Amino acid sequence: MRMKAIILAGGEGKRLRPFTYDRPKVMLPIANKPILEYVIKSLKENFVKEIAIITGYKGETIKDYFKNGDEYGVNIKYLQQKHQLGTAHALNVAKDYVDEELFLVLNGDNIIDPLSIHNLLKETAEKNPGILIKNYDGAKFYGTLEIEDNKIQYITEKKEFPNSKIINTGVYMLPKSVFKYIPETVQTGLGEYALTETLNLMIDQGTDITAIKNDGLWADASYPWDLIDLNQKFLSTQSGHRHGKIEDDVKIIGEVTIGEGTTIRSGSYIVGPSTIGENCDIGPHVVIMPSTSIGNNCSIRSFTEITNSVIMDGVRIGAHNIIEESVLGFDSIVKSNVVMNSGQVRKIVQDDIVSFSSGVMVGENVTIESNTVIDPGTIIENNSKIFPNKHVSKDIGQDSVVI
């Protein structure tokens, strides 16, 4: 049976700022690949090759990266959601794309492995509607489910104190008839409506939707520091492979990937799971500890130590730095003798009080001059500059200069 998939990729991901100011959440890198790439590859491994991606916020970055899908062995069609009017409106954009009785719907900003999609296809036998479910501690960020005899009875939207840990992963097998339940006001762009409201209406009117337990890997990032946890999870599942040039007296332990055109200079010490992209210059005498990903076209100078961090493309890091549990955005510059230690943090983020262990979140095109110490949990937003000899203990907004 030919199966089509619709990926909802129009959202902004505001809680993940500063990393979503210039690109949608689906394009944030985890283990050096955009989140959306994991979704597409998982579909392809289940022989689902006809894919429509619903774009919205910064959608051109998605098109520029994936193009028509040939490189990934799939056929991608792009459909634009011109206004952010909810997930039902986003799905409705694909109404004319669907020509089979059943089709897959996925959120492009949740990483999912091939086994999860296999489970959904197997349990529905590609004949019945279903929703992939999961027990999840952070249930307040997701819709929870009431289930009876393995059938969905009701889907509750996000709430501060959910009465269940069983969440809706946002991975569906849906019937073509779902479009009939989307209100006309939403179809014409006059109202906002969640897909879960549409599904509840279908259930109320007699449609059976099966709850399918997810035994595979499904993961999401709600806040910037969650990128570190996702990166750690996916690096732990990957096998290393080494290209580029590795000089004498380099010690590499465990699963480490080194990309084409990269040079690892003498005296460096790298422990996996870790990945280093293409055309990087690392060392000499650099220490890279586990669960670190370093993007393409990065340079890291001598006697710098990086642990459990996400370094995006084009980052330049000088000598004698300590970077722990941090995220450095695209094209940022860190000079020498900079300390980004990790620690336990408590912050208020969009009216939520959150506690976590983290280092520093550095946005895109940020410059941090030498001899700077930055406290754990600090967020430095895009295009900012911190002059030398500073102790930064508060968040720094976009386009700021700290003198």
Image (cartoon, grey):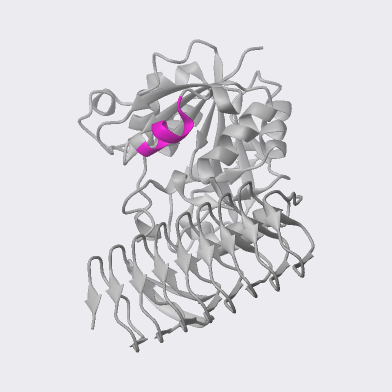
Image quarter of residue 84: top left
> Which of these two is toward me, 386 or 55?
386
> Which of these two is toward me, 130 or 90?
90
Image quarter of residue 130: top right
Residue at x 47% of width, y 81% of height = 345
Is 244 placed left or right of 314 in the picture? Answer: right
Q: From the viewer's perspective, is residue 127 above or below residue 225?
A: above
Which region shows up in magenta? 61-67
Q: Position of residue 122 (x, y in %)?
A: 73, 27
Q: From the viewer's perspective, is residue 253 above or below residue 25?
A: below
Is 86 placed left or right of 215 in the picture? Answer: left
Q: From the viewer's perspective, is residue 143 above or below residue 315?
A: above
Q: Residue furthest left?
A: 190
Q: Position of residue 167 (x, y in %)?
A: 57, 49
Is 118 placed left or right of 206 in the picture? Answer: right
Q: Quadrant of the N terminus?
A: top right
Predominant SS along the magenta part: helix
Q: From the viewer's perspective, is residue 14 above or below residue 302?
A: above
Q: Taking the image as drawn, is residue 208 in sight?
A: no
